[in-house]
């Protein structure tokens, strides 16, 4: 049974490909299902004998069923990760971000696979942050189709846990960053864009005054956590925040990049994005109580790694 693969949906993307590397290093067999919309085959160790890439869509139930055959657990990461993309194309993103989750749940029920790690998001809390750390039981206020789909996915996973004995480990990621986060779209993660611009000398655009805050978490530490949740005997029920409990404003982020690189390009401020969250900081007590998380990578160290310093 230990040769049974772990399925990573969205495994050719930023977080998924780091998870694939970590699982391969742990001796696991890994199967990746990805439609390559933002993910890239080059992110994966394609010649590794224990890695298998299937190109396909989580919105296609047949495809998900086939991908899950013989697997022992699933990391369900496939989604359109851009909040702004969901604001502009809610119907299209709903297929990936919600129907995809339902297809994974149904295929697991049919095939008796129990453990699923799910990539939910801090976006489910909406503007509830107000600057203080947000605990998991804070009332949810999803502001965008992306956040609504993540919250609905969580509720469905909870239903499948009660009704069909699925064992979901639901993580609400705050802002994850690190190597391989694709900076090529205006909707990409802010650190990937700022780092790429700072390295190339192209101007940086800040939406709003730059005082909005995020809780940035390094991808190398995230995948340690995901592996624990995939392989543990038991996982806690209910969602778990993944953040450092540190609020960093975009202006502080720019100063940290300058500290690492010794320079910054020109910076322009434009109007804030619609649906943008002002403050986001994780209360991470549940995370620290249930998992062993290193939290050894402060932002400047993660940035130095990303900026090749
Ligand atoms: P990413 O875009 O690099 O990865 C997403 C992967 O899913 C890509 O490889 C993409 O090709 C694939 N994909 C998208 N739609 C698909 C579909 N319909 N069928 C199959 N594959 C599909 O983004 P990421 O940052 O690695 O995000 C991974 C997960 O983590 C997503 O669910 C995202 O919502 C969630 N998340 C990310 C962050 C973050 O800060 N990066 C924070 C919270 C939650
Ligand atoms: C990010 C993730 C989302 C996740 C959420 C959890 C991505 C693309 N988005 O959304 O999947 O669910 O964290 O907290 O990974 N900004 C600029 N200039 C830029 C780009 C962004 O000022 O060039 C600003 C944005 O307006 C926002 C902040 O930076 O205020 C962060 O934006 P972004 O990285 O897109 O992240 P979130 O919207 O927080």
Image (spheres, grey):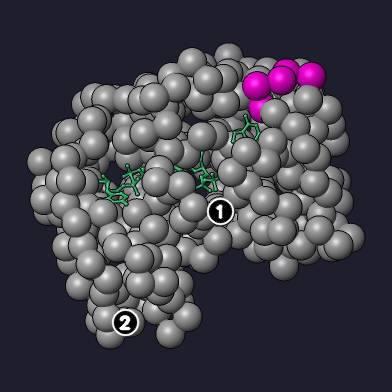
Q: Residue at x 55, y 61 (%)?
A: 180
Say whether residue 73 is left or right of residue 242.
right
Q: Residue at x 46, y 56 (%)?
A: 183
The magenta stretch is 58-62
**In the rendering, at what x and y percent does residue 138 appear?**
21, 32
The residue pinned by badge 1 equals 14
Question: Which of the numbered marks, if any, corresponds to residue 163?
Answer: none
- Label 1's element? helix
Q: Quadrant of residue 127?
A: top left
The one nearer the camera, 167 or 23, is: 23
Few, some or many residues within 10 Å of mark 2 (<14, 14–19, 20+): some
- Would residue 67 be visible to someone looking at this image? yes
The one nearer the camera, 265 or 35, is: 265
Question: Does mark 1's beta carbon lie closer than 8 Å to ligand 1?
Answer: yes
**247 falls in the magenta region:** no
Q: Residue at x 55, y 53 (%)?
A: 15
Q: Residue at x 73, y 39 (%)?
A: 33
Q: Quadrant of residue 152?
A: top left
**61 falls in the magenta region:** yes
**In the rendering, at what x and y percent does residue 301 appear?**
37, 78
- Which mark is first along the chain, 1 or 2? 1
**In the rendering, at what x and y percent does residue 28 appear?**
77, 57
Say whether residue 169 is left or right of residue 75.
left
**In the rendering, at what x and y percent does residue 128 appear?**
16, 34
Residue 57, compared with residue 306, is above or below; it is above
Residue 289, compared with residue 298, is above or below; it is above
Question: Which of the numbered marks, if any, corresponds to residue 260?
Answer: 2
User: Could you tell me what secondary structure mostly forms the magenta stretch?
Assistant: loop
């Amino acid at each position: 049974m230990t040769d049974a693969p772990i399925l990573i949906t969205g495994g050719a993307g930023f977080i998924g490909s780091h998870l694939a590397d970590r699982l391969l290093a742990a001796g696991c067999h890994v199967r990746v299902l990805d439609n390559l919309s933002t993910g890239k085959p080059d992110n994966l160790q394609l010649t590794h004998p224990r890695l298998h890439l299937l190109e396909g869509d989580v919105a296609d139930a047949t495809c998900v069923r086939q991908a899950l055959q013989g697997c022992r657990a699933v990391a369900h990461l496939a989604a359109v990760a851009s909040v702004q993309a969901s604001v502009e194309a809610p119907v299209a993103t709903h297929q990936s971000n919600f129907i995809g989750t339902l297809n994974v749940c149904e295929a697991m029920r049919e095939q008796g696979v129990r453990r699923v790690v799910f990539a939910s998001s801090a976006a489910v809390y909406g503007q509830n942050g107000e600057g203080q750390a947000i605990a998991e039981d804070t009332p949810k206020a999803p502001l965008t189709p992306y956040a609504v789909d993540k919250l609905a996915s969580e509720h469905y996973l909870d239903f499948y846990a009660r009704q069909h004995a699925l064992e979901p480990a639901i993580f609400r990621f705050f802002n994850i960053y690190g190597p391989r986060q694709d900076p090529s779209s205006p909707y990409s993660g802010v650190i990937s864009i700022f780092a790429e611009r700072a390295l190339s000398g192209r101007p940086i655009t800040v939406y709003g005054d730059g005082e909005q805050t995020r809780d940035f978490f390094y991808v190398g530490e995230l995948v340690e956590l995901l592996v624990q949740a995939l392989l543990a005997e038991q996982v806690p029920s209910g969602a778990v925040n993944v953040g450092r409990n540190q609020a960093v404003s975009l202006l502080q982020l720019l100063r940290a990049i300058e500290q690492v690189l010794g320079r910054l390009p020109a910076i322009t401020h434009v109007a804030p994005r619609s649906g943008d969250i002002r403050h986001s900081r994780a209360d991470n007590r549940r995370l620290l109580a249930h998992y062993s998380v290193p939290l050894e990578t402060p932002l400047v160290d993660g940035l130095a790694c990303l900026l090749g310093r």
